[in-house]
Image (tube, rainbow, N blue to C red):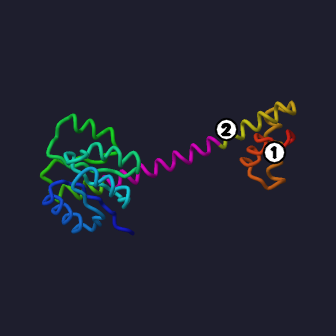
Amino acid sequence: MNKPRILLAEDESILRMDLREMLKESGYVVAGEAGDGDKALELAHTIRPDLVIMDIKMPKMNGLKAARIISRSLGIPVLLLTAYSQKDFIEEAKQSFVTGYLVKPIRKSQLIPAVEVSLGQARRIHDLQGEISGLEAKLETRKRVERAKGKLMEQNGWSEEEAYHALRCESMEKRVPIEELSRRILGGDVKGSA
């Protein structure tokens, strides 16, 4: 199994070095490092890490804004680091694909579980998005079949059952999936007899 690739975005170089060592000791790959939000955004697009660990307060572009852009455009989870635990930061973080929030100083005993949870949540979200896409495709197919049935009913004066039976028989006879036959009927490629 590939080791998770992490992008570190922290403007304090000593803390960034400490984080890098904690992550490497725990078997993670630090795929890139940035000292400001702009560079973090650029690296996220370039290296496509599995997780971004990012400080909230950074020069050029703050971590919250960068996290929002990274999560929305790339779907990469972000674990935020901060010296602040104010409610407004937490509320803003909840609006992004932020999967964790650690308050400095950070110890390895806090960091590694937070990284694991963030990666696990990201996998779960990715799986759910795949399921949603699959269900949406099935729904579209079902709608197309229903519209084709309706067209056959209208053109031939058939009942819904007769239209579906004709559609199913034609599909089997021509060895064409019913979805494709429905698409053809709706596109006018197949005349009303299915």
Q: How many residues crowd around disc 2 within 10 Å: few (fewer than 14), some, or many (20 or more)?
A: some
Residue 121 shown in magenta: yes
Which residue lies under the disc numbered 1? 189
Residue at 39% across, 45% down = 72
Looking at the rendering, the stretch of residues picked out in magenta corresponds to 118-140
* Residue 122 image position (x, y, % from top left): 37, 52
In this rendering, the label closer to the viewer, 2 or 1: 1
- In this rendered view, identify the residue nearer to me: 185 or 163: 185
Q: Quadrant of the C terminus?
A: top right
* Residue 185 image position (x, y, % from top left): 79, 42
Q: How many residues crowd around disc 1 within 10 Å: few (fewer than 14), some, or many (20 or more)?
A: few
- In this rendered view, identify the residue nearer to me: 55 or 171: 55
Prevailing SS of the magenta stretch: helix
Marks 2/1: CA–CA distance: 18 Å
Is 162 left or right of 131, judged from the image as shown?
right
Residue at 30% across, 64% down = 31
- In this rendered view, identify the residue nearer to me: 134 or 187: 187
Element type at marker 1?
Answer: loop
* Disc nearer the start of the sequence (2/1): 2
For the view shown, which residue lies furthest in the front direction?
60
Element type at marker 2?
Answer: helix
Callout 1 amino acid: Asp
* Residue 127 image position (x, y, % from top left): 46, 52
Residue at 87% across, 33% down = 156
Which residue lies under the disc numbered 2? 143
Residue 133 shown in magenta: yes
- Which disc number belongs to residue 161? none
* Residue 121 image position (x, y, % from top left): 36, 51
Residue at 80% across, 36% down = 161
Callout 2 amino acid: Lys
